[in-house]
Image (spheres, rainbow, N blue to C red):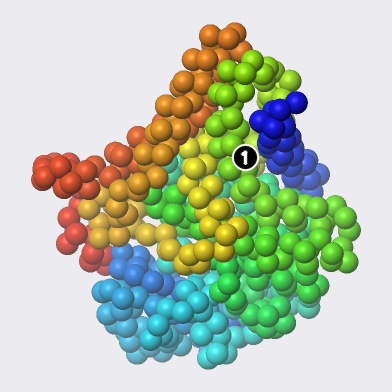
Amino acid sequence: MSVLEIIYVGAVLLLTMYALNSWILTALFLRHRKDPVPRPEITRFPRITVQLPIFNEVLVVERLIDSIVRLDWPRDRLQIQVLDDSTDETIAIAKSLVERYHAQGINIELVQRTDRSGFKAGALREGLKSATGEFIAIFDADFVPDPDWLHKTVPYFLDRPRLGMIQTRWAHLNYNYSLLTRSQALALDGHFTVEQTARPRSGLLMNFNGTAGIWRRECITDAGGWQADTVSEDMDLSYRAQLRGWQCLFLPDVGTPSEVPPQLAAFKRQQFRWAKGSIQCLKKLGWSVATARLPLVVRWQALVHLSTYLIHPLMVMLLLISLPLMLLSFRLHGALGLLSLVSLGPPLMFAISQRRLYPRHWLRRFAFMPGLMWLGTGVALNNTRAIIEALLGVNNVFKRTPKFRIEARNDRWLGSQYALPLDGMIFGELALALYAVATVGVSLWQGNLFAVPFLLLYVSGFGYVGLQGLWDARLDLRRFLGRRPSPKRRGASPQQIIVPERRS
């Protein structure tokens, strides 16, 4: 067997392992989905600090702060910290809102730093210095918790002294906006409803998702606090806490509304950060997890969890070596047959999540599964670059996901000051789509028909991401070509977008 054949079979086997894990988590979810997690009666009202880490959030900062001050909790037991590292007009808006609500008797303060060292982790760490709460709730700028959010979460801590963190499910404000937002919502529903439910209820380790969660302050301190040596400070802290013996809880029935990125480049930036951060956490904590005094299955599942984004470089590798192997007359049937069987696991997981969350119209929502498959495949090159950076230890910069306050179908992000520019990775994705087309041609010529469906997924995935990226960047392309966009297709002007509409 040649080196290429060994690499190919090895990549298929690793992808099979990750796909098989979807079956395992789905089975664990089905087994434990009805496990009772009764919410205790609230016996006291502990002090709560709500931290709002923001950076250049002109479009959503008002909506965020307005929703937080509506949280139902005794005023003398609630502290709100606006952790503002902004460098634009957000500073003035946040300051005005804090002053207005403070004058109304709300215990709210603005914490501003002179530098952005440590990024989000640094801001959370700085806020903790003046936090008065026994428990620390965290919301990113694009989240809008319901007024009773604290009543739905805090009581679980009161009779569980080793419960260190509670994570709630992300709901979606802009699900109906586009194919992109519907596909992302489907992916997030699968992660939260199935994976995050299955892990803690089965005694496995889970991660904090960075927002829409609440921590016991003692747990944060005992686990070593917020650290900025990865760009996934949330996963890092939650794993360190569980290795210290703290417990984590996920509440699937508590949905916290939020936005998903409407711009493909914003989604790719988010995915880049998540992929890079998870591999950084694997490098940082992998040995501690592997040698922890935990059952073998718990340690194995944790390592699979931390390394899941390795799927993407494996996918790219599989595509690149398929063509030369076919030209060398290597038959792909056996390896792909194994992978095709277990690859039904992720779609099943997503279908079950939709059935669980939306029993009346789950099929209509699951119909966007092809979009998610294109997205998951097409983002592979982007995430491969992120993983290479993580493995090499370079460019440890936290790049925020821009928020646009997109809620209705007629809202527009195009033309926003936060819209990301043309992403050069698009051309690599389009090149891979063409390479996949050539590989399909060779497969048909050789009669290797079993490989064609897999290769067509590469064609559609990289083609969709590349072409959608070009369409999203059409203003940049027109400027580059020296053409001004027509008013009808320009989208909202910066003036329309910068100043958010006042909503009481």
Give left or right: position of 27 versus 261.
right
Residue 70: in sight, yes or no? no
Label 1 crowd (10 A; few <14 / some 14-19 / many >=20): many
At 42% from the left edge and 59% from the top edge, which residue is drawn?
401
Judging depth in this view, the residue of 131 and 103 nearest the camera is 131
Q: Residue 421: where, in percent of width, then height? A: 29, 52
| Quarter location, residue 484 | top left
Question: What amino acid is found at the position of numbered circle 1 in the picture?
Answer: Leu
Q: Mark 1 — residue?
A: 314
Image quarter of residue 431: top left
In the figure, is residue 132 to the left or right of 179? Answer: right
Along the viewing direction, whichever of 40 and 222 lies nearer the viewer = 222
Q: Residue furthest front?
A: 2
Q: From what the image shows, is residue 416 above or below residue 159?
A: above
Would you say residue 157 is visible in this rendering?
yes
- Against 267, residue 441 (above or below) is above
Point out residue 151 in the picture as x, y percentages from the top left corner. 61, 71
Task: Write the residue at 61% across / 13% down.
Answer: 448
Picture quadrant of residue 55: bottom left
391 is higher (above) or lower (below) than 334? below
Q: Nearer the viewer, residue 34 or 450?
A: 450
Say whether residue 480 is left or right of residue 248. left
Q: Quadrant of the N terminus?
A: top right
Q: Position of residue 412 (x, y in %)?
A: 27, 49
Q: x%, y% of residue 452? A: 56, 18
* In the image, residue 475 above or below residue 503: above
